[in-house]
Image (spheres, rainbow, N blue to C red):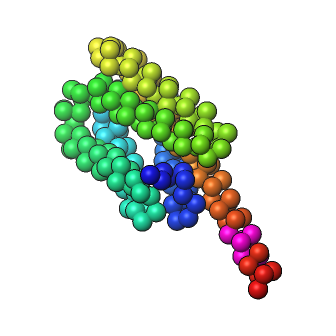
Amino acid sequence: MKSILQKTTTAVKYWWMPLIIGIMFIIAGIWTITTPVASFVALAIFFAAFMFVSGIFNLIFAISNRADIEDWGWHLTGAIFDFVVGAILFFHPPLTMAVLPYLVAFYFLFKGFATFGFAFDMKRYGDSRWGWLLFSGSISILLAIMIIFNPTLGGLTIVIFTAMAFFSLGLFNIVLSLGLKKIKNKGQDMKEGLEELKNRLS
């Protein structure tokens, strides 16, 4: 089965989409860490809205590359999950506040394991940045586990953990986008080389 990082055609034309999502995560982390008191009050709605918007971006990415990624269904499933859950939680604030610790924990746990998959794909492709993805995924999983086993942590602690996880996922998406761009450039070089060889032989 071919992965997203093993494609050198249409999929890499959208390398900038993970970059946008990564920047969004970084901005979310900065906002969360710089306004800890207000953050806990608004974190539930903000987190739901962020899942909703992130789901839209990932949905566009998955659908746009359905013909070039054999396992695009998994990307589509994750995007739909973000989109639907984000919408439900956004329009039901009391529910969001009640399950906020577990929501944050399992969301980052899922993203952390997904990051591992991308990291090993990049390693197989020969991209030296795969270690950064492995690191960011490990941080996300560690923070998620800490929240799961301590759901009664104080509001400030939850906010700080969430901010750190946002930074980790932001790093993952930015590094991933750079890896996709590298693949795109290599694919373009190969195409130009083949065309040049074809011209010489003709």
Rendering coords of residue 132 (x, y %): 60, 34
Rendering coords of residue 157 (x, y %): 40, 17
Rendered view: 75 above or below 111:
below
Q: Is residue 94 left or right of residue 54?
A: left
Q: Quadrant of residue 145?
A: top left
Q: How many marks?
A: 0
Q: Residue at x 38, y 30 (%)?
A: 109
Q: Is residue 57 left or right of residue 80?
A: right
Residue 64 visible at all:
no
Rendering coords of residue 169 (x, y %): 49, 36
The quadrant of the picture occupied by the C terminus is: bottom right
Rendered view: 113 above or below 77:
above
Pick the residue in front: 173 or 73. Answer: 73
Q: Residue at x 44, y 32 (%)?
A: 112
Rendered view: 59 above or below 157:
below
Rendering coords of residue 55 (x, y %): 36, 50
Residue 5 visible at all:
yes
Pick the residue in front: 46 or 112. Answer: 112
Q: Please, which residue is most extreme toward the right here?
A: 200
Does 119 lie within the magenta span? Answer: no
Pick the residue in front: 101 or 122. Answer: 122
Q: Main secondary structure of the magenta part?
A: helix
Q: Quadrant of residue 114?
A: top left
Q: Residue at x 42, y 33 (%)?
A: 113
Q: Residue at x 29, y 30 (%)?
A: 103
Q: Which residues are magenta?
A: 191-196
Q: Is residue 180 left or right of residue 112?
A: right
